[in-house]
Image: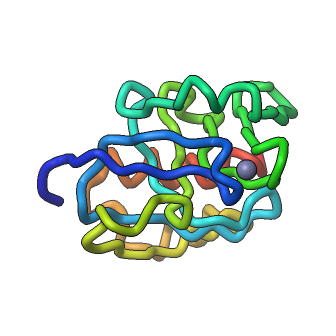
Amino acid sequence: MGSDVVHSGGCHCRRVRWQVEAPTSMVAWICNCSMRGNTHFVVPAAKFRLDPDAEEFITTYTFGTHTAKHTFCKVCGITSFYTSRSKPDGLAITVACIDPDTMEHVEYRHADGRNWEAWFARSDIAGFSAATAVDTVRVSLGATS
Ligand SMILES: [Zn+2]
């Protein structure tokens, strides 16, 4: 995975901007659930820094337990990051919202959020970086449970 670098990113209209420390090569999850259908990776919240100017442009949608915080830009509607239900001390970052210059490689894996049990049973996920992978999969499920 290599060492962490600082990636910059944000929403489409660039009113919400942030920086995140993460490796230059990463595994991202493509989720098919109804809430997002987006592709993301997960970092500890401590590695994420929101620009102070961005806060006034963020709006938050919650449901169910209200632990998950689905954050949108008020202007362009893009979710560039959000807080998941199963890992509230972590943040899910939308891969497409990272400025491309600092990314070397992204490995895309499919998380089947609609049929999670079956998907987990047949995947090789347990074999590669167990703890991180399971956390990441649970994040993908946050909106459907
Ligand atoms: Zn925006």
Q: Is residue 93 left or right of residue 78?
A: left
Q: Residue at x 76, y 44 (%)?
A: 73
Q: Horizontal placement of 131 versus 89: left or right?
A: left
Name the residue at 47% across, 59% down: 98
Rendered image coloring scheme: rainbow
Q: Is residue 73 above or below residue 40?
A: above
Q: Nearer the viewer, residue 104 or 28?
A: 104
Report x, y in % for residue 101: 33, 67
Q: Position of residue 54 (x, y in %)?
A: 64, 32
Q: Position of residue 65 (x, y in %)?
A: 80, 26
Residue 123 percent location from the top left of the image: 44, 74
Image mark count: 0
Q: Is residue 45 above or below residue 82?
A: above
Q: Quadrant of residue 85?
A: top right
Quadrant, the C terminus: top right
Position of 28 with respect to 94 (left or right) is left
